[in-house]
Amino acid sequence: MTEKIKTDLDIKVNFRYVPTANNPADFFTRGLTINSFKENLPLSYEGPEWIRQEESSWHHDQLGCLSKAQMGRICPSVNYVTENEVTTSVVELERFSSLSKLISVTSLIFEFVNRLKKRVMDRKLQANTYLIKTMQKQSFSAELDFLLNPEGNNVPKLVKDLNLFLDPKGIVRSRGRIEKSVYHPYEVQNPVLLGKKHRLTELIIRECHQRSQHLGLATTLNEVRLAGYWISEARQAIKNVVNTCAKCKKFNAVSFSTPNPTNLPTPCVNFSKPFLHTGVDFTSHIYVKGKDGDYKMYIVLFTCMSIRAVHLELVPDMSVKSFIQAFVRFMNVNGIPTHLYSDNARTFTAAARIISKGMIADEFKERFNSYDLKHCTIPLFSPWYGGSWERSIKTIKSCLYKAIGRGKVDYFGQITIMSDVQRAVNSRPLTYISSDD
C-alpha cells in the first residue's frame, strides 16, 4: 500500500509511534470523564504542540511493536482505483439491495480518492462508470479482450450479433440502428451491455421495476431500455427479479381464477384518436392527510378505449359538480371526446349512480350540449362490459398501494404520486417487446 501511494501520488509514507498522552484518538477510544474531556479539548482540536512545529522537533520513536510479516497478516491489502484500471470491485455488491445505495457508497470512495489526488470530478459518474466496467470485465471478458485488441478472424458471437464497441470511457455498448433519431439520447441509441446473471444487473432491473410502479415484466423491460441498458436474454433476467419482488407477490396473489373474457367492444379494435372514445369511473375513497386530520377523497379515472391510456383527477367527493370540474380539466388536456362510456347499474356501485345523474343534470347539459358528446352506458347488471376501465382501476390502485402502502400523504403528495402512476401506466408498451435485437 505504501509503495502504491508513493508511485501514484508521489508521497513518502513513514510510520512513527505517538505517545498516548499526545494522541487525541486515545481519549475517546479508551473513555474519559467530562472533566478530562474539557481539559484535553485544546489537544483534540489542535493536536499536540510539537506537530505544529518544525519536523525536526517531532517524535521519532519507531513503531517496533509489529514486524513487517505481522503487519502483512493483519493489515488488508488495498487496491487503488485508477481511471484506466478495473480490478475486483472494492465494494461487495451482495451487501446492497438498492442501486442508489450502492452508487452512493461507491461515490464516497471516489470522493476520498479525488481528494488525495487533488482533483475535482463528478464522483457519482465515476462510481457508475467503475461499477459498469467492473461488471463487464467479469461478465464479458472474451468480448472485452477482442474489442481492446481487434485482431484475427475469431470474432465473438455477441460482438457480431449486437455490433458491440467501446465508447471513449471504455464501456462496452451495443450500436443500435436509431442513431439518426433526434428524440432519443445517446445512451438509448447505444445502450450499455449488461450481464444477465450479474448482481449489478439485478439491482438495475430492481430500480427500473420500482420506477415503473411494479407494473410487470413488459413495462420493466421498456424502462430498462429507456434507461440506456441492454441485457442479453433480458426477458428471463427481468422475470427472475420480478418474481422475487415482495410487493408484487403480496398484491398480485389471487384466490380464484377469472372467467373467460368476452369480445372486445368496437372502440377497442379500431383506429381512432387517443381519448376519442373515453371510459370513466370512480375509484373507492382514499384518505388524504390534512391539517385537521385525514379526510376522504376520490379519484376519477378517464381511460382511452383504444390504447388504454389513462388520465387521473383527484376530487373531494362524488358529486355532479366535482365530476364536471374533473371532466373539464380532462378535456383541457386531452381534447373533447365524441363518446363517453360509463356504468349504468343503479345497484352496482355508487359511482355509476353519480355519473348517471351527472349525464342528465341541467348543469351538465348546459356545459356540454355544444360539444355533441354522446354518452353510452353498459347493459344493466353486466359489469364485465366495463372491463376496460375496471382493469385500469385495478392497475392504478395496485400502483398506489405499492407506492404509498399504509401511509398517508397530503394533497400535493397525493397528486404527485398520481402523476407518477399516470406516467408509468401511459409509458407501458403497446405491443410485445422482444428480448432479441
Image: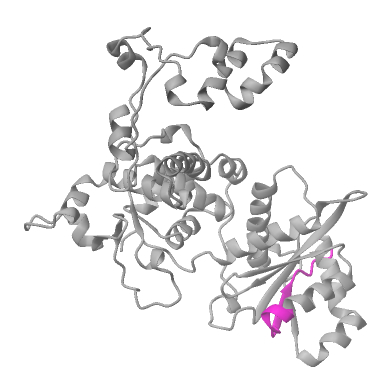
Q: Position of residue 300 (x, y in %)?
A: 76, 66
Q: Nearer the viewer, residue 45 or 276?
A: 45
Q: Position of residue 316 (x, y in %)?
A: 86, 62
Q: Position of residue 384 (x, y in %)?
A: 66, 63
Residue 370, image quadrant:
bottom right
Residue 309, image quadrant:
bottom right
In the rendered image, is residue 238 in sight? no
Instruction: Point out the residue furthest to the left here.
Output: 152
Taking 396 as reference, is 299 left or right? right
Q: Nearer the viewer, residue 353 or 312?
A: 312
- Please state the extent of the stretch shown in magenta in the rendering: 331-348
Q: Residue at x 43, y 49 (%)?
A: 119
In the rendered image, is residue 40 in sight? yes
Taking 336 as reference, is 157 left or right? left
For the C terminus, the image quarter is bottom left
For the N terminus, the image quarter is top left
Q: Can residue 96 be found in the magenta stretch? A: no
Residue 212, image quadrant:
bottom right
Q: Position of residue 30 (x, y in %)?
A: 60, 10
In the image, residue 195 above or below residue 218 = above
User: Could you tell me how many numbered marks the image carries?
Assistant: 0
Q: Residue at x 69, y 83 (%)?
A: 337
Q: Can residue 337 be found in the magenta stretch? A: yes
Taking 33 as reference, is 295 left or right? right
Instruction: Point out the residue furthest to the top here.
Output: 65
Taking 361 as reference, is 344 left or right? left
Q: Residue at x 86, y 70 (%)?
A: 322
